Amino acid sequence: MTDTASMTDATEAASTPAVATDLAVEVITVYRTFEQDTAPVRALRGADLAIERGEFVAVMGPSGCGKSTMLNLVAGLDVPDEGEVIIAGESLAGKDENTLAIMRREHIGIVFQFFNLLEGMTVLENVVMPAVIAGRKRKVAESRARDLLDLLGIGDKAKQAPGVLSGGQRQRLAIARALANEPTIVLADEPTGALDSEGGEEVLELFRRLHQGGQTILLVTHDQPVACAAERIVRMKDGRIDDDGLG
Ligand code: ADP
């Protein structure tokens, strides 16, 4: 090996980790087919996507184009048939269920369309619980949960049941819960889909504020005005990325 070659190798080796850590998520040519009685559904057909830390990305596309399937793969809730998903520099490939659950707790906060709140617990407990499950001390978890509820404008509802909240407030609680473990990325699947326009705007404004604070966010929606809250819009079609929004 020449000196120049070894220098190049050394430079590449030194620069590789820095590049890798800038990416919160890498989706590398993933395929996912669902076997159906009638015919297999090819939900993802070679989708590629890279999201840098701090980005607010909306994935748009018509119903059935594979948005939720891709989100589930990024969340480690489903596994691709081919291709790879890398979160914060660590591949999900070949990880067992237990390891995936640990990675999810550490890196992923998920916000669903229908909130998925624990109705039998108080608003505060809904946010404390994920942090306690992740091994944080209750006092630390409670203190962060109170801060999050204040930040999200529902601090005065801490002791109440989620049932007393409006739709927009319920989704804000779901977002507080998603943030409980300081995730690498917040994933949101049609987060305004079940809200009226006022509630929807509340939630989008909150995502914008979180983004300004440096939170990485990946939101999927079929709704253009919702996608416009993001700084980058990725368009999907037929299981692939049609436009990565990078111009
Ligand atoms: P989108 O989120 O863009 O509406 P999805 O990712 O939900 O699209 O679905 C893509 C395709 O895969 C659709 O045809 C859908 O019916 C199908 N699909 C998604 N999940 C499953 C599943 N668990 N079993 C069978 N088919 C599925």
Image (spheres, rainbow, N blue to C red):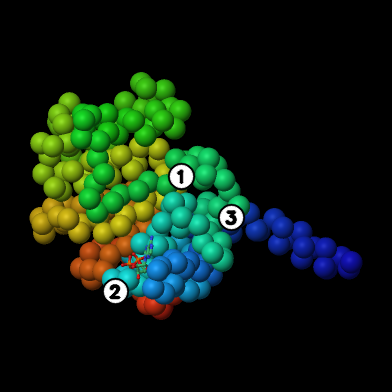
Quadrant of picture, ligand 1: bottom left
Q: Provide the secondary structure element on which disc 3 rests.
A: loop
C-alpha gap between disc 3 and disc 1 = 14 Å
The residue beneath circle 3 is 93
At horizontal 51% and vertical 53% (from top left) the residue drawn is 87
Side of 214 where 225 appears, left or right:
left
| Label 2 with label 3: CB-CB less than 8 Å | no
Residue 89 sits above or below residue 129 on the image: below
Task: Residue type at mark 3: give it.
Answer: Ala
| Label 3 with label 1: CB-CB less than 8 Å | no
The dot on residue 62 is 2
Task: Residue type at mark 2: give it.
Answer: Pro
The dot on residue 190 is none
Q: Position of residue 111 (x, y in %)?
A: 30, 49
Q: Position of residue 150 (x, y in %)?
A: 22, 35
At horizontal 36% and vertical 27% (from top left) the residue drawn is 141
Q: Position of residue 134 (x, y in %)?
A: 44, 32
Q: Provide the secondary structure element on which disc 2 rests.
A: loop
First in sequence: mark 1 or mark 2?
2
Q: Quadrant of the C terminus?
A: bottom left
Q: Position of residue 71 (x, y in %)?
A: 40, 59
Q: Is mark 2 within 8 Å of ligand 1?
A: yes
Q: Quadrant of the N terminus?
A: bottom right
The residue beneath circle 1 is 104
At horizontal 16% and vertical 43% (from top left) the residue drawn is 169
C-alpha gap between disc 2 and disc 3 = 28 Å
